Image (cartoon, coloured by chain):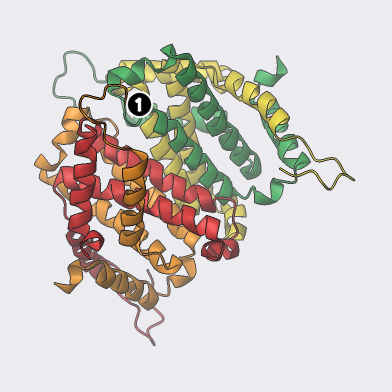
Chain colours: A yellow, B green, C red, D orange
């Protein structure tokens, strides 16, 4: 299903912005600000919840819809930022995980002197 | 290449956290906070730049690496949050775009009375 | 003690920026971004803590210093933003509290039908 | 005027929360999250503006009111966080400025070798 492919979603987002003449607003700086604002709107859903309440947030249909909607907004701005910068987000994450697996080695059982 | 598939990256992130016993910290609330913190670290790169400087940020190898690295962190926490919540981020974005195409219709040329 | 007066701190921040020729960076937009970035650095200290651990954060001298330092950064950018915008932050808060006391009336005991 | 004193505003905020039984939500972690969310709501006003437009934001009464209102919210959560932590925000900022004046010395004219 093409809509569920990252590159296809990026093309659809770019066409959506172009059709509305919104590209003029989409500097990397503005998209990074918008991404940060949307991530905070997602956090707002959780801000007064206990850890236990936060684990049950998808059980209520209204909250579940709001969470999905904010996740969509965060991903939308992340993909648009990657589009204007020419960054492949999946490749960036794979490269970062390669580095993290070296930086944070798994502690071996029986070797209590290890720490991180 | 399996590493560049969203579901595979989610599995790799989950295995990485499980191997380090970090799952206890990964409540939806904490992951939403971490996502917001990483989005701000990405914004920090751009905060004092002019729009024009922000458009050239990938021309400098040091800045380009820092940008890719923060994008990876944002995506990592977004995918981990989706994992614990059971949300498919690509499906959430496709559904949101369906709604946005209705909410923000393209203005027709020759119809200057339209506004949004 | 003059240093502990809001207006005096604003003057000191403005003189500090002017002496370093940093005023050129201090547009309202950039200062709002910097304020948001510093608020996230403060949140970062708490992001993996349980509610109980977060309540004890000042008991550790290292954490206590880090918290105070980030609070200072948030207040610094808030006061600088207010300076360039000509907003009196204490008057803005007093006006907001007047409105909130009307918006969120205290529920009267013995009147269980009240809710908010 | 007592309302425009920081300590008096802190007392008024604490009484407001106590009267509504909201203290249970006001862990340092939750207040730090709420502060970060409010700082993002302030940034949202500026996110698509050019630097020049952002400098004129107070010229429009609607925008000016919205900016003041979000500044009030940021200050409210900052003061409530300081209240539960026992931090004096003005003293924290004065101490930070003392350190910054040492860390970022003003470059002397005629001494082009200085840099920072």
User: In this view of the protein, which residue sits in the foreground, C71 or D44?
Assistant: C71
Horizontal relation, residue B26 to residue D108: left or right: right
Point out residue D2 in the picture as x, y percentages from the top left corner: 18, 73
Location of residue C64 in the rendering, given as x and y in whole percent from the top left corner: 50, 59
At horizontal 23% and vertical 42% (from top left) the residue drawn is C16
Secondary-structure class at tag 1: helix
Q: Mark 1 lies on which chain?
A: A
Residue A78 horizontal side relative to residue B51, left or right = right
Q: What residue do we see at 17% from left, 42% from top?
A: C84
Look at 69% across and 51% down and name the residue there: B24
Q: How many labels does the image show?
A: 1
- Quadrant for the N terminus of chain B, please: top right
Q: Mark 1 points at which residue?
A: A29
Near mark 1 (Cα within 10 A), the count class, few <14, some 14-19 or many ≥20, is many
Q: Does the image show residue A49?
A: no
Percent of width and height locating residue D63: 17, 43
Q: Position of residue B6 (x, y in %)?
A: 64, 25
Asked whether, in this view, residue B68 is left or right of residue D60, the answer is right
Q: Nearer the viewer, residue B74 or C86?
A: C86
């Amino acid at each position: 299903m093409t809509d569920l492919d990252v590159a296809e979603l990026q093309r659809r987002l770019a066409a959506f912005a172009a059709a509305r003449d919104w590209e003029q607003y989409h500097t990397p700086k503005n998209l990074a600000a918008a991404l940060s604002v949307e991530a905070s709107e997602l956090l707002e859903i959780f801000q007064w919840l206990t850890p236990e309440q936060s684990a049950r947030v998808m059980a209520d249909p209204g909250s579940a819809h709001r969470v999905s909607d904010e996740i969509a907004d965060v991903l939308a701005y992340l993909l648009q930022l990657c589009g204007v910068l020419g960054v492949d987000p999946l490749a960036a994450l794979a490269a970062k995980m390669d580095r993290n697996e070296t930086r944070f080695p798994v502690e071996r059982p029986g070797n209590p002197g290890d720490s991180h």
